[in-house]
Image: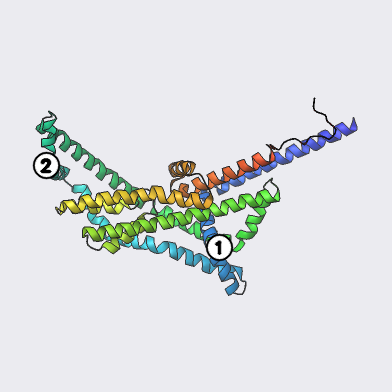
């Protein structure tokens, strides 16, 4: 009886301990939740640039704080230069673009589009099918005018939201910088302690850590190489089309390719419209076809690089990346493949440990009937 009471008390203490542990962890999560996005970005950057930090660590006489500070400044400068370039150019063009979108007469623009359609003899094609060309012109012109007006309102709304969130963006950058410094300096030790908490055997823990590291590196490499390919292809297209400053526009396409909701299309589509305005129809149509190829590269090259390096199935990789974008925004580009790779790794461990499909060993002496 005493042993039963003793066991019961031990169970109560164990249950109470885990209740307090879960409660404290939930409180800790609520405190750190506003900074989780900054921590994830810092973790990604640290994993990519950690070899550079290791080199600095040995060059500075194994002074971790100094090496972490230099690495943080270099990484942020490397990431800030393209953004600074975009901000400078947008600062020059945004006032004119805002004024144009606010005061634009979209009826005149729709008439210009209708004129271009007439150049292609669309009306005569429709008449061959028994459709009145006058009705077609009224309907198409009204739809074009409405679409352009809605597009201008959407762009103005995005401009306003971007400027309203500018202070929050710089604050998050500051949090990322602080996290970068401490993750560079103490990241290896923190990662070791975190992996030791996983209720897995040592070889399984190493497998999970390796999968996470390989996936992050593959995603970053895929994003960079895809953006580089799109920037080069866009620059070649601008040169062939005879667009002014093609190298500058190609560089902007390269930078915008890192941003999913912009992409290289945010450069070649306005350039195509400008070519139409300049009555360079042949060049504009050619650039549209080339732009479709550029956009197609993003949907093929990126999953192919990630899938080949991280050994992930392309089908699931494509949909998890799109789902990650929808749920987590830009961060979903990284989180989608990472979650997929970790899920596959844990399923493999589950199959190995809990679904032992080995054939039973036959006992000696058993005779077959």
| Among the two numbered marks 2 and 1 on one chain, the one whose residue lies closer to the N terminus | 1
Residue 159 visible here: no
Estimate the x, y position of residue 118 in percent, counting from the top left: 11, 42
Q: Quadrant of residue 319?
A: top left
Which quadrant holds the N terminus?
top right
Q: Which mark is residue 128?
A: none
In the displayed structure, does residue 197 sit left or right of residue 158?
A: right
Please report the residue visible at 52 percent of the width from the left and 59 percent of the height from the top. Answer: 48
Note whether 360 is above or below 296 in the view shown.
above
Q: Position of residue 99 (x, y in %)?
A: 21, 52
Point 43% across, 57% down: residue: 224
Choose top left, top right, bottom left or bottom right for residue 318: top left
Please say if the residues under marks 2 and 1 sit with CB atoms less than 8 Å apart.
Answer: no
Residue 163 place in picture, x, y as percent:
35, 52
Q: Quadrant of the C terminus?
A: top right
Considering depth in this image, is 315 or 84 the residue closer to the camera? 315
Q: Judging from the image, what secondary structure is the residue with disc 1 in?
A: helix
From the image, tell me which residue sits under label 2: 118
- Front-most of residues 319 and 267: 319
Query: What's the colour scheme?
Result: rainbow
Estimate the spatial distance between the alpha carbons at disc 2 and disc 1, rounded to whole Å: 59 Å
Is label 2 in a helix, a strand or a loop? Answer: helix
Residue 80 visible (yes or no): yes
Q: Residues within 10 Å of mark 1 (few under 14, many from 20)?
A: some
Q: Which disc number belongs to residue 50?
A: 1
Residue in view at x 44 percent, y 44 percent: 325
On the image, which quarter does residue 157 sit in? top left
Q: What residue is drawn where x is 90% and y is 32%?
A: 2
* Tag in front: 2 or 1: 2
Q: Nearer the viewer, residue 258 or 318?
A: 318
Residue at the farthest right position: 2
């Amino acid at each position: 009886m005493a042993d039963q009471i003793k066991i019961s008390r031990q169970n109560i203490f164990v249950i109470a301990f885990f209740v307090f542990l879960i409660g404290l962890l939930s409180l800790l999560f609520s405190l750190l939740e506003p900074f989780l996005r900054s921590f994830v970005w810092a973790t990604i950057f640290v994993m990519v640039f950690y070899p550079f930090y290791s080199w600095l660590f040995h060059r500075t006489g194994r002074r971790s704080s100094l090496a972490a500070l230099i690495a943080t400044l270099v990484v942020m400068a490397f990431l800030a230069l393209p953004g600074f370039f975009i901000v400078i150019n947008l600062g020059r063009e945004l006032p004119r673009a805002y004024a144009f979108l606010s005061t634009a007469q979209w009826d005149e623009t729709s008439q210009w589009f209708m004129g271009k359609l007439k150049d292609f003899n669309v009306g005569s094609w429709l008449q061959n099918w028994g459709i009145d060309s006058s009705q077609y012109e009224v309907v198409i012109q009204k739809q074009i005018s409405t679409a352009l007006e809605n597009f201008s309102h959407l762009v103005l709304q995005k401009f306003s939201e971007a400027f309203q969130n500018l202070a929050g963006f710089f604050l998050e950058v500051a949090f990322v910088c602080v996290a970068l410094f401490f993750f560079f300096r103490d990241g290896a030790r923190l990662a070791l302690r975190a992996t030791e908490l996983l209720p897995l055997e040592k070889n399984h823990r190493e497998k999970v850590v390796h999968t996470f590291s390989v996936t992050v590196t593959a995603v970053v490499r895929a994003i960079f190489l895809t953006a580089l390919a799109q920037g080069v292809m866009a620059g070649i297209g601008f040169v062939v089309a005879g667009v002014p400053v093609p190298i500058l526009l190609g560089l902007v396409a390269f930078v915008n390719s890192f941003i999913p909701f912009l992409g290289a299309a945010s450069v070649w589509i306005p350039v195509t419209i400008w070519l139409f305005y300049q009555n360079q129809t042949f060049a504009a149509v050619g650039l549209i076809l080339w732009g479709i190829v550029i956009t197609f590269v993003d949907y093929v090259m990126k999953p192919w690089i990630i899938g080949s390096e991280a050994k992930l199935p392309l089908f699931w990789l494509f949909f998890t990346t799109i789902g990650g974008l929808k749920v987590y925004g830009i961060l979903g580009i990284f989180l989608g493949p990472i979650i997929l790779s970790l899920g596959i790794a844990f399923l493999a461990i589950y199959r190995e440990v809990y679904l032992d499909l080995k054939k039973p060993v036959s006992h000696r002496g058993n005779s077959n009937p």
